[in-house]
Image (cartoon, rainbow, N blue to C red):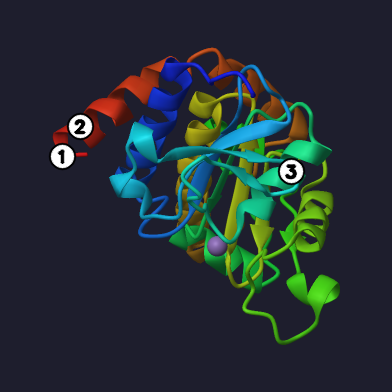
């Protein structure tokens, strides 16, 4: 029997589900997972349900083949292979978010690259890759990451980055903790919105790679500050 995950980690995962809905990153769809804190070959994720309604009892353990370990036989999301294959490919990754956050979608379909426009999104780095599912599975898929092979192709496209776009679908964000991955997902959406606005005004001066790295390092020291605000705001919204 695998060891139980810590209750504090499960609590944070539940809160993260609610924050991401409240901040407009997730809606009825999308998911967040965290690597199990004592079994690195497992990750924790909600059963297949709307993220805004997730409670601690809804959290399941899933292995890196995408098989759920649940005595009640419950299932998680079809697209669990996004999570399993990124955890397999990236031992440094401790948390993953897959969303359809709306402002990001245009950057996956136009050739306009998503780049860091301000210091809060330095984690985007020099370049955000776009995953083209047609290269892996042809021209008639439903765009979902439905199996291990597609998960591996997506993980390869992400490479060592923190954010990857999925053409005509959404994006994936990774981090070393729940707090960091939530921060990154919220500011990925915000950067996309700001970049779209700035593009209408003229040519954009983006952060240099050095600025992006320095700003990202700085923000990583203060992840608890916005987390507490987002948590309070989600609670006030009734989550
Ligand atoms: Mn999806």
Q: Mark 3 points at which residue?
A: 86
Q: Mark 2 points at which residue?
A: 235
Category of crowding for the residue at label 2, using alpha-carbon neighbours closer than 10 angstroms: few (below 14), some (14–19), many (at least 20): some
Determine the residue located farthest toward the bottom in the rendered image.
140
Q: In which quarter of the image is the C terminus?
A: top left
Q: In this view, does 98 lie above or below 212?
A: below
Q: Position of residue 15 (x, y in %)?
A: 35, 31
Residue found 74% across the figure and 62% down from its top: 131
Upstream in sequence: badge 1 or badge 3: 3
Q: 178 or 202, which is in the foreground? A: 178
Residue found 39% across the figure and 55% down from its top: 49
- Label 2: element kind: helix
Residue found 61% across the figure and 26% down from its top: 36
Q: Mark 1 points at which residue?
A: 238
Q: 80 or 65, which is in the foreground? A: 65
Q: Where is residue 16 in the image (x, y as percent from the top left)?
A: 40, 34
Residue found 82% across the figure and 44% down from its top: 159
Q: 94 or 163, which is in the foreground? A: 94
Category of crowding for the residue at label 3, using alpha-carbon neighbours closer than 10 angstroms: few (below 14), some (14–19), many (at least 20): many
Q: Can residue 160 be seen in this view?
A: no
Question: Is residue 224 toward the left or the right of residue 112 in the image?
Answer: left
Q: Are marks 2 and 1 in contact (CB under 8 Å)?
A: yes
- Label 1: element kind: loop
């Amino acid at each position: 029997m695998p060891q139980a995950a810590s209750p504090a980690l499960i609590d944070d995962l539940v809160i993260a589900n609610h924050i991401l809905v409240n901040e407009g990153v997730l809606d009825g769809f999308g998911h967040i997972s965290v690597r199990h804190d004592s079994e690195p070959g497992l990750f924790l994720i909600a059963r297949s349900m709307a993220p805004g309604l997730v409670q601690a009892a809804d959290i399941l353990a899933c292995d890196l083949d995408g098989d759920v370990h649940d005595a009640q036989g419950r299932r998680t999301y079809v697209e669990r292979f996004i999570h399993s294959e990124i955890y397999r490919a990236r031992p440094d990754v401790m948390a993953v978010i897959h969303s359809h956050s709306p402002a990001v979608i245009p950057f996956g379909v136009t050739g306009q690259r998503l780049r860091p426009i301000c210091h809060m999104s330095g984690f985007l780095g020099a370049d955000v890759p776009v995953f083209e599912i047609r290269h892996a599975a042809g021209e008639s898929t439903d765009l979902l990451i439905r199996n291990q092979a597609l998960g591996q192709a997506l993980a390869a496209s992400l490479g060592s980055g923190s954010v990857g776009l999925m053409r005509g679908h959404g994006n994936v964000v990774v981090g070393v903790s729940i707090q960091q991955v939530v921060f990154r997902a919220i500011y990925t959406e915000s950067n996309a919105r700001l970049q779209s606005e700035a593009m209408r005004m003229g040519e954009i001066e983006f952060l240099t790679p050095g600025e992006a790295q320095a700003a990202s390092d700085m923000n990583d020291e203060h992840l608890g500050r916005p987390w507490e605000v987002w948590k309070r705001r989600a609670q006030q919204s009734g989550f």
